[in-house]
Amino acid sequence: MKVRAKEKDGVVSIKVLMNHVMESGRRKDKKSGELIPAHFIKTVTITANGKDVLTADWTGSISKNPYLACKYKGAKGDKVKVSWVDNKDKTAEKDVVVK
Amino acid sequence: MKRRHFVKNTLVAGVAASFASSQLWAEEPAKPAETKAATTPEAASTSTDAGSTSAFDAENVADVLKALGAEKAETSDKITLGAPDVAENGAVVPITIETTLENVTEMSIIAEKNVRPLSASFELSPEIAGLVATRIRMGKSGKVIVLVTSGDKIYTSEKQVKVTAGGC
């Protein structure tokens, strides 16, 4: 997971790139013809200094290796944490300091 | 070239699969559609362990709007929906929601022609400065609809997106 957070004029822009297959559960295996089980990120949480900024509820119709961007009113030095949980309960998180 | 094939096959398989297995999602644990049907939008968006909710399970735009309580959403020119006119690759359609509305608490992205139209919903804190962006999948050309909840009102904006590469 890659996270960038940059402040300009009191507004912090956060850009996140996650590595995930994001299987929708509707795609078939080309060889066996069987459906590939769904495997996608369900929830993404972005916090700044421990406070929730954004919570995303996602489905399998988000592109693979998802991109997420948002802006919030913040300052340089804020501690931004991005974490996700997928439908198999795998998680990942990353902390960055706003530049 | 390989990627093109991959995308094309994905979409074709996706469309075919959607007809063959409309009960697939219901089979997944912890989200029988019937029992979820009554959940309110608030409960739906905060239930992180259920995986899917009534709004996410809805199969057409009208049902999604109903589940989100957004049937009477007002069209607002304070929402800028950034989406391509023509998306070459339906698997990656960049969507940007920008708004000058105050007190935005929730945003949702709906792709009209997808089997499960509701793609994503975002719960926002008051600190959000009016921009959220992500990339979604679209099976076919169709409208992209965004809902923005500001105060106790829901506003909407939509844009037609044409999907080329194997999308139809």
Image (spheres, coloured by chain):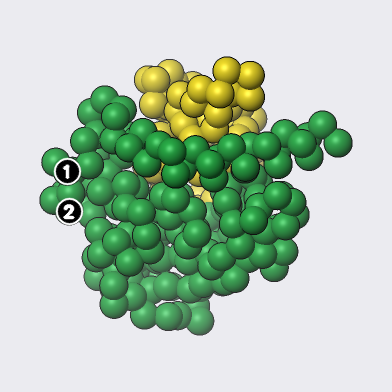
Chain colours: A yellow, B green
What's the distance in space between the residues labelled 1 and 2, CA to CA?
Answer: 13 Å
Does the image show residue B137?
yes
Mark 1 vs 2, N-terminal side: 1
On residue B165, the disc is: none
Chain ID, mark 2: B
Q: Which residue is mark 1?
A: B34
**Residue B44, position in %: x, y?**
24, 47
The residue at the point 51 percent across, 72 percent down is: B158
Is label 1 in contact with label 2 (beta carbons under 8 Å)? no
Disc 1: which chain?
B
Q: On the same chain: label 1 and label 2?
A: yes
User: Residue B154 in the image: x percent, y percent?
Assistant: 33, 71
* Nearer to us in this view, B46 or A48: B46
In the rendered view, would you say B46 is above or below B82?
above
Q: Residue at x 70, y 41 (%)?
A: B8
Q: Is residue A95 visible?
A: no
The disc placed on residue B40 is: 2
* Secondary structure of residue under mark 2: loop
Q: Nearer the viewer, residue B63 or B42?
A: B63
Neighbourhood count class around disc 2 (C-alpha, 10 Å): few under 14, some 14–19, many 20 upward: some
In the shown orientation, is residue B94 left or right of residue B39? right
Residue A88 image point, x, y percent: 39, 20
Residue visible at 64% across and 56% down in the picture:
B168
Position of residue B61 relative to residue A39, above or below, is below
Q: Residue at x 37, y 20 (%)?
A: A89
| SS label for mark 1 | helix
Q: Residues within 10 Å of mark 1 (few under 14, many from 20)?
A: few
Q: Name the spot of residue A20 as percent of width and height, x first.
A: 57, 27
